[in-house]
Amino acid sequence: MTDAALKAQLEELRTTINEHNYRYHVLDQPSISDAEYDKLLNQLRAIETEHPEWITPDSPTQRAGAEPSPKFAKVTHPAPILSLGNAFDEADLRAWFERISRLDERVRKASFVAEPKLDGLSVVLHYKDGLFVQGATRGNGDVGEDVTANLRTLRKLPLRIPAAAGGPKPPADLFVRGEVFFFKKDFEALNKRQSESGERIYQTARNTAAGTLRQLDPSITASRALTFYVYNIIAAEGKIPATQWETLQYLQDLGFPTAPESVLCKDLEDVVAAYKQWEAGRDALPYEVDGMVVKLNDIGLYNDLGVVGKDPRGSIAYKFPALEVTTMLQDIGVNVGRTGVLTPYAMLEPVEIGGVIVKQATLHNFDFIAEKDIRIGDRVLVKRAGDVIPYVIGPVLTERKKGARKYKPPAVCPVCGQPVETVEDEVAWYCVNAACPEQIVRNVEHFVAVLDVVGMGEKIVAQLNAAGLVKDVADLFSLTREDLLSLEGFADKKADNLIASIEAARTRSLHQLIFALGIRGVGWVMASALSAKYRDLDEIAKASTQDIDDIEGIGPNIAETITDWFAQASNKAVLKKLKKAGVWPRSEPRKAPSGPQPFAGLTFVVTGTLPTFSRKDAGDFIEARGGKLAGSVSKKTSYLVVGEDAGSKLDKARELGVPTLDEDALKQLADQA
Ligand code: IVH
């Protein structure tokens, strides 16, 4: 290749990589996999190694991260926030060891610390005289974004150190670095909530963590269970430990959470052994990791070795094999869920991802297929993360073949053949036939799970349905011992136990029963709101859409779904049967608050940091005076109570013309009213 052609290629690589950096770090919407990104960066590095004279200070190889977003105030870090070089296999790791051993003989006898490489967002926390004063994202490595208010909402973050009496006295100024991320279970719970309320599903924990931390409204950050671990001291004014292993201990003593999996390795062979162990146990870890960070334990030696580009020589990221692979999309199938929602899934040419053979992966919903323009016959990028169901990220467009077919969602339910429907403002498609057998089974499964019917799993539900014994949830309560004994696999004891656990389910609360009915969009929280307003299912059945819409937290679409559900003949029949079977819990009326009720009939939303009230104080103050508290601003909001750093809620209030109050004005209003 001529120099001119090579240079053109270099320019193009830089432009492409910069665009991906922007998508990843600023928009939190990557369009390629990490592995593909690494490939581009390696190509660029290869050219730059051949032609070091072409390296410019703004080349993507010369920096970590992306420019801080103008949405946030900028924070200059006390020292550069460095990145890490990668090792993709044992040979890379050993080559790294040799390289640095040649630079400094001490490395040959050195010990290492192996830490999980957490897949989250790097942050720098500043403590002044033991107080948490500022927290920032890495940004471009020199300047980050001020996300202090959001970081304060992380429950594990110590606002003062030492967090416990008897801890060491911290340096007057201390900057620590850590990673903000989601535990797998919390990320799954977040997505479950999203899907229950018909909202978008988040794809990757890492980008959602980044998006959550970079919210303008801290209450959104607070509403999601972000967590973090710290792993380095960036700068300190005062004495700090001389080794990485002691640093981790010291940070713990100060009250910071650190990754419990970190280990001290006496030499490189120990590191190799630890890696093998971790890789095998990777799925069992409570969070996502993409590798192991290997650090020289001796911080003096580490510092002496210096930095290449933005990577310190004394540590390296030893990556696990990618959990993202590409494979061929052979066909698209459709599942029917308990609320009748149809979900497409990918039928894949079987492929190994991190030791597991994957044949199917979720495609989320039909809009997703259209948005990503996924076609049958495409090569698609698939990711598997821990125990989460594998999912399709998107097609590999460069490899699209001529014969790739566009996909059309089914017009009828693949199980019962009845026409499907869509709901305005929702991405889901539904089978609305209440008699659809697939739905019945799923619905009963959900019902018994919510009502805690011990011993009734998926298989038994399917058996009961196939035998014609359970056609709706109410049928469960008329099952007899004989019915059960007629099924395969049932002996006396098993039948008795199951009858006993069905009996026990008769007396669950109204709140539980509403949720168990599986009304589309009605999750645990909404079921609670309904059971607080209405005494029993009859009262809800009689309520108008407007009545239900008036409940804080329930919007007009769901209100309509609820009244529709209660109006449907098949559901009325189920309710009648439940009542007859004595499964008819009533909720206790809420205790009337005592004292004057100046805020009766008013709904408040609180945002930002108030001068003296905590969020809870403000809520208690409002509710004690008869006011209602809501989580988001709508036209039903009477007042928005605004503190410092108020974000999108304030914008929304202005847009809707909702009046705002500060803390003083709130107190005055209580006195006047
Ligand atoms: S040390 C200069 N330790 O991985 C040292 N980084 O690929 C670099 N990361 O930007 C940081 N877990 O965001 C370190 N235990 C750990 C880490 C970790 C995750 C992230 C960090 C860094 C990226 C580099």
Image (cartoon, grey):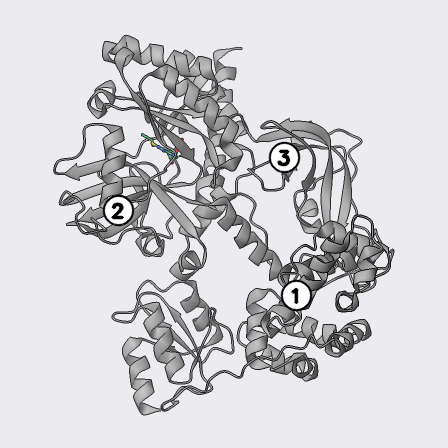
Q: Residue 382 bears which disc, if any?
A: 3
Which mark is first along the chain, 1 or 3? 3
Can residue 39 be seen in the rendering of this structure? yes
- 3 vs 1, front mark: 1
Mark number displayed over residue 413: none
Instruction: Give percent across and percent down for residue 67.
Output: 37, 40
Q: What residue type is labelled 2?
A: Gly
How many neighbours does mark 1 have within 10 angstroms: few (below 14), some (14-19), or many (20 or more)? many
User: Which residue type does callout 1 highlight?
Assistant: Ala
The outermost residue toward the front is: 492
Under tag 1, what secondary structure?
A: helix
Q: Are marks 1 and 2 in contact (CB under 8 Å)?
A: no
Secondary structure of residue under mark 3: strand
In the image, 225 versus 407, the foreground residue is: 225
Q: Which amino acid type corresponds to the residue marked 3 in the rendered image?
A: Val
Which label sits on residue 516? 1
* Residue at position x 39%, y 38% in the image: 66
